[in-house]
Image: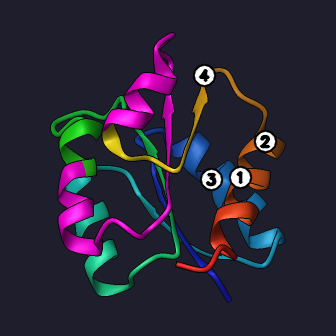
Amino acid sequence: MKRVLIVENSDAVRAIFDEALADEGYEVRAAADATDALHLAQTSPPDVVVLDLMMPVMNGWSLCERLRVALGHSIPLIVITPTLGAAEIAERLGASAYLTKPYVLDDLLHLIAQLAWQPR
């Protein structure tokens, strides 16, 4: 079973992701903030990370850097951002993929499926 770490500060969005990914057969770990995300990543390393860049306290940029240190650069990372320059942001962060808000849940599920099963 592939493990997905969702880092999203919205309770409602986390719940939707959790249910949708569990229905697809993934083991889901969800974090509301950077501290929880780092703890989960270190105690239960994911196969894919989905990271909303707009986070309180520690922004997604800083969290991404810390996740890369904790997990290495081979872990696929999908960033979610409302920014028009999402492609450039994703490239600078070394993300495997990105989605801009608003997005379609099926698009996220497709990206996760693609990345979770890629050889590293």
Residue 63 or residue 75, whichever sits in front: 75
The local secondary structure at tag 4 comes to loop
Q: Is residue 73 magenta?
A: yes
Residue at which label 1 appears? 111
**On screen, 66 above or below 104?**
below
Judge left or right: residue 91 versus residue 12: left
Give the amino acid type for the residue marked by disc 3 in the picture: Ala
Residue, x 71% and y 52% (percent of image)?
111
Q: Which mark is residue 11?
A: none
Give the amino acid type for the residue marked by disc 4 in the picture: Lys
**Going from the N terminus, do you reach mark 4 or mark 1 first?**
4
Residue, x 69% and y 49% (percent of image)?
16
Q: CA distance from mark 3 to mark 4?
A: 17 Å
Residue 36 can be seen, yes or no: no
Q: Which mark is residue 101?
A: 4
Residue 24 or residue 16, whichever sits in front: 24
Residue at which label 3 appears? 15
**Going from the N terminus, do you reach mark 1 or mark 3 first?**
3
**Going from the N terminus, do you reach mark 3 or mark 4 first?**
3
Q: Are marks 2 and 1 in contact (CB under 8 Å)?
A: yes
Q: Which mark is residue 107?
A: 2
Q: CA distance from mark 2 to mark 1?
A: 6 Å
Identify the coloring: rainbow
Residue, x 71% and y 28% (percent of image)?
103
Q: Could you tell me residue 27's position as x and y percent?
A: 62, 79
Residue 80 can be seen, yes or no: yes
